[in-house]
Image (cartoon, rainbow, N blue to C red):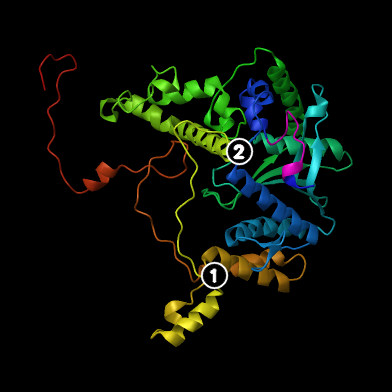
Amino acid sequence: MAHSERAHARFSASSAYRWFACPGSARMVASAPARLPNPHAELGTLAHEVLEGALRAGIWQLPPDHMHAGRPVDPEMRAAVNTCLSYVQDLCDMDDDAVLLFEERFDLPTHVQPDETYGYNDILVWLPMYGQMHVIDYKNGAEIVDVEENKQLLYYGTGALSRFKDWDVRSAFLTIVQPRAFHPQGPIRSYEVSPERLRAFLHEVDDAVLACLDPDAPLVPGKKQCRWCDAFTICPAAEAAALNVAANEFADIRLVGADTMPDPKTLGLDRLAYIVQAAPFLKAWLDACESRAFGFAMMGHPIPGKKVVRKLSRRQYDGDPAEIAESLTLITDVTLDEVMPRKLLGITDMEALLVARAKEKAPRGKKKEAAEQAKHSLAFFTIKEPNDELTLVDLSDRRDAVNPIAKSLDGISLPELPMLPAHSTESA
């Protein structure tokens, strides 16, 4: 069954981040219009299907000419999926008795709504030699997903622990594989939990589901829980929160206009900080509204003030690139390298190629070591230049803070300013 055709539980693992944080969302989603096509979701679904297809076929590295459903896999997606495949292969190589499961449905034995609490785990690896259960979730998006206390992974881990009672699980590793997102800890991040933590999570699910079933369950808008909520664009709490970002006196989107929005130059630091902090939520809400309007327009519904048109056409080559390049050298005064220059593979593709070759030659139990040696060999030919560009991020970011003013005044002695008494009435 294709991923997009699966039935989804009302309290599924993949939406746990939402209904845990916003109990009222369960009620809103149940009455929301049918979901419209979303290109980001469709791309993520395709990546998961490519990953599942490779695991079913026993392929640990997708070749450049790999096909899925009769179509070639995009190089970026291929590199991302290969990152996950390589990690899973390294885990399985640790134990001759390793158990590999993928796209497994796990039902939580909850006391509340047991028929509506299940989800499909991307990958599960059981290493009996070490008593380790590795719960892996592949994320194709570029928006950072935190692994610590990740509700979706805790959900899968709890479901697996409940089903495989004969496994002597001493520790569970919850892992996010997110190759297309930049994170200081890298594309693969793990969080170790005990079996006791997973059993305790089962009770937390019961409490959260009970809160959702309350007729007066509150709507709690926020960037994380609203991002992929099906009811995002019809939720009154989300609209109110989005309007409050720019100007808290607006109660209706129709009141927003160029002449009514506050001038940023008149805003104090506290208000600016609040707007910058909440801006991603506002952008997500606006993007969701625009996407939904486009979806309705594509189904033939007229959108007031808008129309659907064809995008501007751009020229493209007609024929095989190699044949075109060769023909151009015959009819013009150019060389082949000028019209079709050769270049090194990108570092990501190069690393994937070297690692795959190294693993092919290495014996069982030595594949991870061979892969690390291949990466070390490539590192000899690479360099990481420092980036002097500055950006504004949350205080939780792991990078050291930079004071651009202090840096620009380095080595310059400024005169000391006279200090006024604390209660002085003198004017500056």
| Mark 1 or mark 2, whichever is nearer to me | 2
Q: Is residue 110 left or right of residue 262?
A: right
* Callouts 1 and 2 close, C-beta under 8 Å: no
Q: Residue 131's spot in the image, x, y percent?
A: 80, 47
| Circle 1 crowding by C-alpha within 10 Å: few under 14, some 14–19, many from 20 | some
Q: Amino acid at mark 2?
A: Met
User: Disc 1 marks which residue?
Assistant: 378
Quarter holding the C terminus? top left
> Of the numbered discs in the image, which one, if any, rests on residue 332?
none
Residue 33: quarter of image: top right
Q: Residue at x 60, y 42 (%)?
A: 38
Q: Nearer the viewer, residue 418 or 61?
A: 61
> Of the numbered discs in the image, which one, if any, rests on residue 299?
2
Q: Residue 61's spot in the image, x, y percent?
A: 69, 64
Question: Which range of residues does the magenta coloring cover?
Answer: 4-14
Q: Residue 132's spot in the image, x, y percent?
A: 77, 47
Distance CA(mark 1)–CA(mark 2): 50 Å
Q: Quick check: can you spot residue 291? A: yes
| Circle 2 crowding by C-alpha within 10 Å: few under 14, some 14–19, many from 20 | few
Q: Is residue 410 above or below residue 324?
A: above
Q: Quick check: can you spot residue 177? A: no
Q: Residue at x 68, y 65 (%)?
A: 66
Q: Amino acid at mark 1?
A: Leu
Is 7 magenta? The answer is yes
Q: Residue at x 83, y 50 (%)?
A: 128
Q: Is residue 389 left or right of residue 181?
A: left
Residue 173: quarter of image: top right
